[in-house]
C-alpha cells in the first residue's frame, strides 16, 4: 500500500489505474480507524479493483467549540490496518492541499436535508462535509464510494448531492458495525471513561425500544421522543435530540409515514455519540 499526501500524486496513480481499465473504490474517513471503517473497506473491495482510503480531519465541518484539535490522529496505526485490509492507497493530505487558497469561497451545500437532526445542533457541519467530499471526489474520481449508515444523515446528504450535481459516483451505504454489546463503533468512543463505556450501549437499547414501540402501534412520535430523551437523561446522557423522522426527507415523521428512521445524538461525558435504527411499516400497519 502506498501513502500519498498530494493531489498531484493521487491524480497520477488514478490515471494509471484508469488506463489499465480498473474500477476505483473510495472510502473517505477522518482516520483513527476501527473495525467499522474496515467493514467499509471490505464493501469497497467487493465492488472495485483498487481501493483508496482518505484520512483527513476536515476543519470546515467542525464548529468553533468542537473537537477539531483533540480529534485522534493515529496515521501509522491506520496505515498498518489499511495495508492488512488490502487497500491500494491511503491519501493523507495536509490542510493546505485541500484548502489551497485558504478560507474557501466556494461551498457545496445541501439545503433542507442538512438542516435537521445533527444539522440543527452543528450549524455548517454538513456544508463542510459536502464541500470536502466534493473535493475528494474531484481528486480521486472514484467509480464508487462507501459511507456508513451510522452517520445516517451524512449518507442521505451525500446521496442527494451526488444525484443533484450529477456526480458520476455510485454511493454505497454500509451497515453499522457494532461492539458485541451493541454500541456503534466510533473513533470518539475512545473518549469514554470505563464507567461511561458501560452505559453507552443504552443509546442503541433506547432506539431498539423505539422500534419495538412503533412496530407495536405507537404513532404519537413526539410523545415517544420525549419519553426516550427523558429516560436517556435519567441515565446521565446530555441529549441533543431523539427524533422519529421520515427516512427519506428526515422531516419529523407523522402517522402516515411508512419508512422511518429513529435517530439520536447525545453526549456522554466528553464524546457526542450518534446512532439510529430504521423501521419499515407495512401499509396495513398504519
Ligand atoms: N461503526 C461503524 N459502522 C459503519 N460505518 C462506520 C462506523 N463508524 C464510522 N463509520 C463510517 O466511516 C466513515 C468515516 O467516519 P469517521 O472517520 O468519522 O469515523 P467515526 O468512527 O464515525 O468517527 P466519529 O467519532 O467522528 O464519529 C463514515 O462513512 C462513517 O459513517
Ligand atoms: C465523510 C467525512 C470523511 C468527510 O470529512 C467525514 O464526515 C466522516 O468521517 O464521516
Ligand atoms: N463521522 C462524522 C464526522 C464528524 O462528526 O465530524
Image: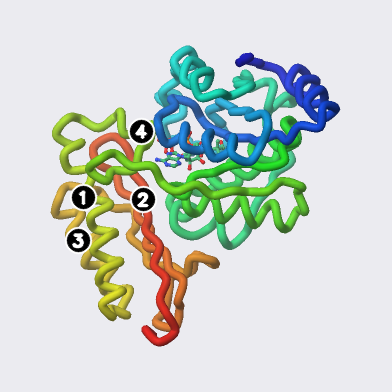
Image point 23% across, 63% down: which residue?
A: 209
Instruction: Determine whether the residue tagged by mark 4 lies in a helix, strand or loop.
Output: helix
Q: Which mark is residue 275?
A: 2
> For the residue carrying disc 4, how many other residues have a C-alpha within 10 Å: few (<14), some (14-19), or many (20+)?
some
Tell me the number on the disc at residue 186. none
N-term mark: 3 or 2: 3
Residue 188 — which label? Answer: 4
Q: Is mark 3 within 8 Å of ligand 1?
A: no
Tell me the quarter of the image containing the C terminus: bottom left
Q: CA distance from mark 3 to mark 2?
A: 17 Å
In this picture, is 151 found above or below 12?
below
Tell me the distance, in whole angstroms, between the alpha carbons under discs 3 and 4.
23 Å
Judged from the image, the secondary structure of the residue bearing numbered disc 1 is helix
Q: Ligand 1: which quarter? A: top left
Nearer-N-terminus badge (1/4)? 4
**Would residue 212 appear left or right of 44 to someone viewing this image?**
left
Q: CA gap, disc 2 to disc 1?
A: 11 Å
Is the CB atom of the residue marked by disc 4 within 8 angstroms of ligand 1's nearest atom? yes
Q: In front: mark 3 or mark 1?
A: 1
* Colour basis: rainbow
Element under disc 2: strand
How crowded is the residue under tag 3: few (<14 C-alpha within 10 Å), some, or many (20+)? Answer: some
Q: Quadrant of residue 130?
A: top right
Q: CA distance from mark 3 to mark 1?
A: 13 Å
Amino acid at each position: 500500500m502506498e501513502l500519498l499526501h498530494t493531489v498531484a500524486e493521487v491524480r497520477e496513480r488514478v490515471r494509471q489505474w484508469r488506463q489499465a481499465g480498473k474500477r476505483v473504490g473510495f472510502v473517505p474517513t477522518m482516520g483513527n480507524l476501527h473495525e467499522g471503517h474496515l467493514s467499509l473497506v471490505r464493501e469497497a473491495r467487493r465492488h472495485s479493483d483498487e481501493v483508496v482510503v482518505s484520512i483527513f480531519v476536515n476543519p470546515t465541518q467542525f464548529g468553533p467549540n468542537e473537537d477539531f484539535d483533540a480529534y485522534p490522529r493515529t496515521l501509522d496505526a491506520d496505515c498498518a490496518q489499511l495495508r492488512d485490509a488490502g487497500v491500494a492507497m491511503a491519501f493523507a493530505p495536509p490542510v493546505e492541499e485541500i484548502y489551497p487558497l485558504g478560507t474557501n469561497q466556494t461551498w457545496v451545500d445541501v439545503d433542507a436535508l442538512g438542516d435537521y437532526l445533527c444539522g440543527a445542533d452543528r450549524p455548517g457541519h454538513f456544508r463542510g462535509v459536502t464541500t470536502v467530499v466534493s473535493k475528494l471526489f474531484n481528486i480521486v474520481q472514484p467509480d464508487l464510494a462507501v459511507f456508513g449508515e451510522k452517520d445516517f444523515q451524512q449518507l442521505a446528504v451525500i446521496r442527494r448531492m451526488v444525484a443533484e450535481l450529477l456526480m458520476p459516483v455510485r454511493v454505497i451505504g454500509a451497515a453499522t458495525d457494532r461492539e458485541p454489546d451493541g454500541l456503534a463503533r466510533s473513533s470518539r468512543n475512545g473518549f469514554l471513561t470505563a464507567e461511561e463505556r458501560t452505559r453507552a450501549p443504552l443509546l442503541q437499547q433506547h432506539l431498539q425500544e423505539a422500534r419495538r414501540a412503533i412496530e407495536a402501534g405507537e404513532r404519537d412520535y413526539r410523545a415517544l421522543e420525549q419519553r426516550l430523551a427523558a429516560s436517556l437523561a435519567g441515565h446521565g446522557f446530555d441529549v441533543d435530540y431523539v427524533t422519529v423522522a421520515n427516512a427519506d426527507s428526515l422531516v419529523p415523521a407523522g402517522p402516515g409515514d411508512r419508512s422511518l428512521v429513529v435517530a439520536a445524538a447525545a453526549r456522554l461525558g466528553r464524546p457526542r455519540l450518534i446512532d439510529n435504527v430504521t423501521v419499515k411499516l407495512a401499509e396495513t400497519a398504519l
